[in-house]
Amino acid sequence: MKAVVVKDVGVIELQDIPEPEPAPDQIKVKIAYSGICGSDPINVKGGLDITPYQKGSIGWLQKPLPRGDGVHILGHEASGTIVKIGKDIKGDFKIGQRVAMNFWNPCGICYYCTKGSYFCEGFISNSGAMAEYALYREESIYPLPDNVPLDAGAFLEPTAIAVHAVENAHIKLGDSVLITGGGPIGLLIMQLVIKSGASKVLVSTRTAEKRKLAKQFGADVVVDPIHEDLLAITKEFTDGRGFSVSFETSGSLSVARQLILLAESAGTVVWVATYQGNLDVGVPISYVHAKEITIRNVVPSPYSFRSALQMLPKLDLKPMITVYPLKDAIKAFEAQSTGKFSKILLKP
């Protein structure tokens, strides 16, 4: 089968590799669409150093998990149809069933799993989805309702992140909301906060195409942070108070810090993006204390997938989608690097 493989650091290649066959506890899925995440080009180049260990800290790994041997197939946002079911599968899955998938599932038996937390210490990864076929454990597979097409189904994983972010923010009716970054996660969060009762929403993003989408999806104000003064616009937009809730999705450390300064008293800041592990944002602690600002963070949570699945039919996803055939994966990654496209899907 064809698959997008990381051949070397900074190099991807469309390769012919053996078609996988499911183990007794796996389900084989024929991939319909696989999304290019903003993290994929970074992982191709060797990945961010996001090891959470800090000197003097406790409870986290002190070195990255090894990737292990074997072919590294990209892709963790995907949808498809079931073509083969392992003999030990207990769920009510059927051949030909339309599904979306999570790229990992919790072990269910570690300390955090037994507490109902998503910080699993022994999570199990599934195979990469930028391929014609991929294998999944049944806990990672979500049947799609009839009103969710397969291209929208490929948004399940990023929507789960957006849902988790909004849940962490505790949006209240009438809140003012700032979202920095206009990629898929930012635009999904924007749609969700409007549905959660936010009364005023501002989206700040460098890309004109993404500002246009944000406006189309219901943003009250869109800002070009390169050529416009976000601080001055915030003062006018929030009557000088700052935002009730802010979401940082751009991955910029300076912007992550700026959100603290743009928060209203007792406001909440949610850092959603992934940041380089060895850098420090420099939180102004006395300022945070005086204004009683809450700072939250977001990591992927398997427990948000069910809620995300329920929200998929309610979200406007079609305008975000650009489709490339799998055979043109290299061109698709080049297009992704321009920053002009919201979500590129690969179709085998």
Image (cartoon, rainbow, N blue to C red):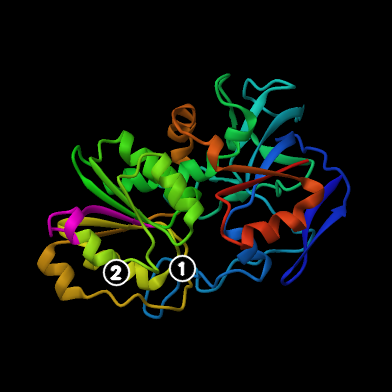
Please give left or right for residue 86 compared with residue 174 in the image: right
Residue 98, labelled with which disc?
none
Q: Secondary structure at mark 1?
A: loop
Front-most of residues 208 and 267: 208
Residue 300 drawn at (x, y percent): 48, 50
Please name the amino acid that badge 2 sits on: Gln
Residue 200 drawn at (x, y percent): 24, 44
Q: Where is 347 relative to 296, above or below?
A: above
- Pointers 1 and 2 in contact (CB under 8 A)? no
Please name the amino acid that badge 1 sits on: Tyr
Residue 238 magenta-highlighted:
yes
Query: Would you identify the image quadrant in which residue 335 lies?
Result: bottom right
Residue located at (24% from left, 60% from top):
233
Q: Is residue 14 visible?
A: yes
Residue 84 drawn at (x, y percent): 78, 29
Front-most of residues 213 and 175: 213
Over which residues does the magenta segment extend?
235-248
Q: Is residue 163 visible?
A: no
Query: What residue did someone put label 2 on?
Result: 258
